[in-house]
DNA sequence: AACGGAACCTGAAAGC
DNA sequence: TGCTTTCAGGTTCCGT
């Protein structure tokens, strides 16, 4: 599920659950989320630590403990953090558990990830995966001139370029599709052929679609996952074959960079 | 050096 | 019904 809006929602939840809390026990239930690091070492490092702050950059989370310990979390394709009562049986996809004590209350913050594309990393400094991220469209905003220069230096399709996290951090397949539709740019348009006005429009479109995504998770009860069966909230993602909301012609679907890409062949022109 | 595609995994849904 | 195929919102590695 996670693109920037879902990770932002996860950050808010983790802040509520963990800030000021002490990790009494850390458990890694499937070492594959560590990509080779030692589960035992990680569990020992986290145990006893108190959480100071939770940050997000792009799709990465950084949980800062005291004594300079940093826990980085990437949710991959199916990762999510959930709250569980102590003693609740672990479900199949529960890959890590943090037993937590906060203000005399005890509970479990658990990491679920059926597909195991996510990962946990413990470090004393920022890791390259975090440091090499481009600007976060929500935190930093998107500078049109900078984005134009960066895109102009590449020879790729604009859709694939938007998924490059060193260019912009947090845009994933859905929001790339949505932003290109909003900006009326063909997903297969070459980055070096885009005009400055197009890039400026695209920058605003990215900010718009991400902000709308974040807003969907706001409210008294932050729910991280859309209810099953809830309507698709996107303008064109997942709507291939249906009428374009702007011109009513049927939406097309192609594959770019190995990922499904919906667009409107009438509204989104490759050159202009 | 940069790009396109395969690989890494599981599970839900669609197809037969 | 049950088996098979397809698809999924991410990143990384490998060959060209």
Image (cartoon, coloured by chain):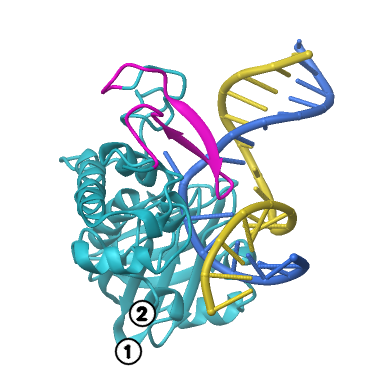
Chain colours: A cyan, B yellow, C blue
Relative image position of residue A7 (x, y in whole percent): 34, 55
| Element on which disc 1 rests | helix
Instruction: Choose between A254 and A221: the one closer to the eye.
Output: A254
Residue at 60% in and 61% down: A29
Q: Nearer the viewer, residue A10 or A39?
A: A10
Q: Residue at x 23, y 54 (%)?
A: A203
Rounded to the nearest whole Å, what is the CA distance between mark 1 and mark 2? 8 Å
Q: Are marks 1 and 2 in contact (CB under 8 Å)?
A: yes
Give the SS element for disc 2. loop
Marker disc for residue A38: none
Q: Residue A108: in sight, yes or no?
A: no
- Depth check, front residue: A34 or A67: A34
Q: Main secondary structure of the magenta part?
A: loop
Which mark, residue A67?
1
* Residue at which label 2 appears: A49
- In magenta segment, residue A248: yes
Highlighted magenta segment, given as a residue range? A245-270
Q: Which residue is painted at 50% across and 50% down in the image?
A: A77
- Horizontal side of A197 relative to A45 (left or right) equals left
Q: Earlier in the sequence, mark 1 or mark 2?
A: 2
Name the foreground residue: A253 vs A112.
Answer: A253
């Amino acid at each position: 599920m996670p693109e920037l809006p879902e990770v932002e929602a996860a950050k808010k939840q983790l802040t509520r659950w963990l800030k000021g809390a002490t990790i009494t026990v850390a458990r890694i239930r499937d070492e594959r989320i560590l990509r080779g690091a030692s589960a035992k070492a990680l569990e020992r490092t986290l145990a006893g630590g108190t959480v100071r702050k939770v940050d997000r950059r792009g799709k990465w989370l950084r949980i800062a403990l005291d004594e300079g310990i940093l826990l980085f979390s990437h949710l991959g394709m199916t990762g999510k953090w959930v709250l569980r009562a102590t003693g609740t049986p672990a479900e199949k996809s529960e890959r890590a558990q943090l037993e937590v004590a906060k203000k005399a209350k005890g509970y479990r913050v658990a990491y679920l990830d059926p597909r195991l594309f996510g990962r946990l990393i413990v470090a004393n400094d920022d890791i390259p995966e975090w440091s090499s991220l481009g600007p976060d469209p929500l935190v930093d905003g998107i500078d049109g001139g900078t984005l134009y220069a960066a895109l102009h230096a590449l020879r790729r399709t604009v859709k694939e370029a938007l998924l490059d996290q060193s260019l912009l951090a947090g845009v994933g397949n859905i929001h790339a599709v949505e932003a290109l539709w909003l900006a009326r740019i063909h997903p297969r348009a070459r980055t070096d052929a885009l005009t400055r006005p197009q890039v400026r429009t695209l920058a605003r479109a990215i900010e718009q679609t991400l902000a709308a995504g974040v807003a969907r998770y706001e409210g008294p009860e932050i729910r991280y996952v859309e209810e099953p069966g809830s309507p698709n909230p996107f303008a064109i993602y997942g709507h291939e074959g249906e009428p374009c909301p702007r011109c009513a012609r049927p939406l097309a679907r192609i594959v770019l960079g190995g990922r499904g890409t919906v667009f409107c062949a009438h509204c989104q022109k490759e050159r202009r």
